[in-house]
Image (cartoon, grey):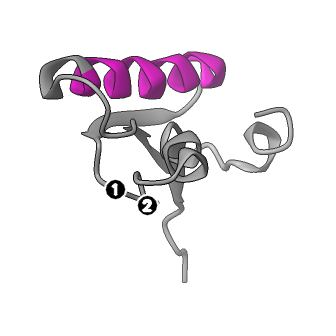
């Protein structure tokens, strides 16, 4: 976040999506994914317009492998900066 935050322009919209692996109950994973996204949003503070989305176990990686489950426990940060002409 220390690298990303200074590069975000004030007029940008930030979307933070939280993910989990597919182990466990769906409701728990959705709650965990939302917590992950909100945790990262907290680092940004109130300086930016931030939307958090819980994606849950959306299978970013192969969950049949331990490495895939590890990498699925993540957040994705999307910065949408309006273009000025």
Q: How packed is label 1: few (under 14 Cα within 10 Å), some, or many (20 or more)?
A: some
Q: Is residue 42 above or below residue 2?
A: above
In the rendered image, the quadrant that contains the N terminus is top right
Whether the magenta-drawn stretch holds residue 37 is answered as yes
Identify the disc placed on residue 62. Answer: 2
Give x and y (percent) for residue 73.
50, 37
Q: Residue at x 61, y 49 (%)?
A: 67
Q: Residue at x 52, y 25 (%)?
A: 41
Give the mark toward the camera: 1 or 2.
Answer: 2
Give x and y (percent) for residue 43.
65, 19
Give x and y (percent) for residue 49.
44, 35
Q: Is residue 30 above or below residue 67?
A: above
Q: Are marks 1 and 2 in contact (CB under 8 Å)?
A: yes
Identify the disc placed on residue 59. Answer: 1
Front-most of 64 and 53? Answer: 64
Whether residue 7 is visible: yes
Q: Which residues are magenta?
A: 29-45
Q: How packed is label 2: few (under 14 Cα within 10 Å), some, or many (20 or more)?
A: some
């Amino acid at each position: 976040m220390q690298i990303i935050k200074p590069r975000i322009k004030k007029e940008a919209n930030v979307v933070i999506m939280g993910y989990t692996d597919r182990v466990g109950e769906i409701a728990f994973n959705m709650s965990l994914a939302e917590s992950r996204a909100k945790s990262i949003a907290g680092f940004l503070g109130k300086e930016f317009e931030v939307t958090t989305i819980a994606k849950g176990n959306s299978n970013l990686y192969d969950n049949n492998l331990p490495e895939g489950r590890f990498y699925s426990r993540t957040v994705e940060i999307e910065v949408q900066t309006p273009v000025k002409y």
